[in-house]
Image (spheres, rainbow, N blue to C red):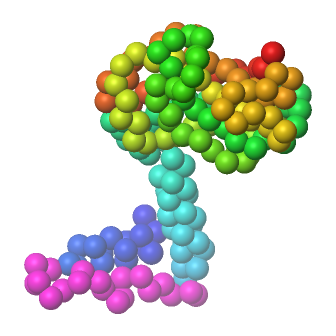
Amino acid sequence: MTLSSMLILGGLFACSDDANDTGADDTANTVDPATDSDDESEVDADDAEDESESDDGSAEDEVGTCGADYGFCGSIEIPTPLEGTPRAMAISLYDTLTPAGPPNVTVTEIDAPEVVAGEPYVVEFSPLIATGEYYVWVFLYMEGGGEWAPVPGVDYFGHSAETITFDRAAVNFPSITLEMAE
């Protein structure tokens, strides 16, 4: 155990039950630079490594949007090549595989989504309070394309292969691949 580690631990054990005591010990973090300067950098590097591990989002995804009630998450596969400039993306729920008219549920509409050809576009949305069995439909509207319906040869679309149950629990939908509207 290094000197700085012992001093830090000593400061932690020095806390009292006094309600006015903040638990801080001004001498707990002092280091004699002549004898222990290398050890201090090791402790700081260890602390930074621990913080980066907890900030990587892996634990948050389990309890965050994608694991919480009413969470809606998944990915949309952007085609290669992607022709045109994306103007908007609409994610909707329909109770039929061939949508006609407005959706049963509009999940979200994203203005000028930052999509990259050949890379997945990650969706994390909450709360989605829909209940029932629906297909997830995605429409990527390009500049010069449609607004309520995709324009053939300009816009893109895709949908889930099967219905998904929406019942308050988090929904992690399978990847949806977009294709040019025909």
Report the side of 122 relative to 87 (left or right).
Answer: left
Give 133 or 1, whichever is nearer the viewer.
133
Give 144 or 124, whichever is nearer the viewer.
144
Q: Quadrant of the N terminus?
A: bottom left
Residue 53 at what x, y percent from top left? 52, 51
Report the side of 59 relative to 52 (left or right).
Answer: left
Count how many numbered circles sit on residues in the image: 0
Residue 162 at what x, y percent from top left? 52, 10
Residue 3 at what x, y percent from top left? 44, 74
Q: For the point 89% across and 28% down, which residue is it?
A: 81
Residue 159 at what x, y percent from top left? 61, 18
Magenta stretch: includes residue 121:
no
Q: Quadrant of the C terminus?
A: top right
Magenta stretch: includes residue 22:
yes
Can the viewer see residue 63? Answer: yes
Q: For the point 52% across and 26% down, which residue is it?
A: 103
Give 58 or 11, whichever is nearer the viewer.
58
Specify the segment rendered in magenta: 16-34
| Magenta stretch secondary structure, dominant | loop
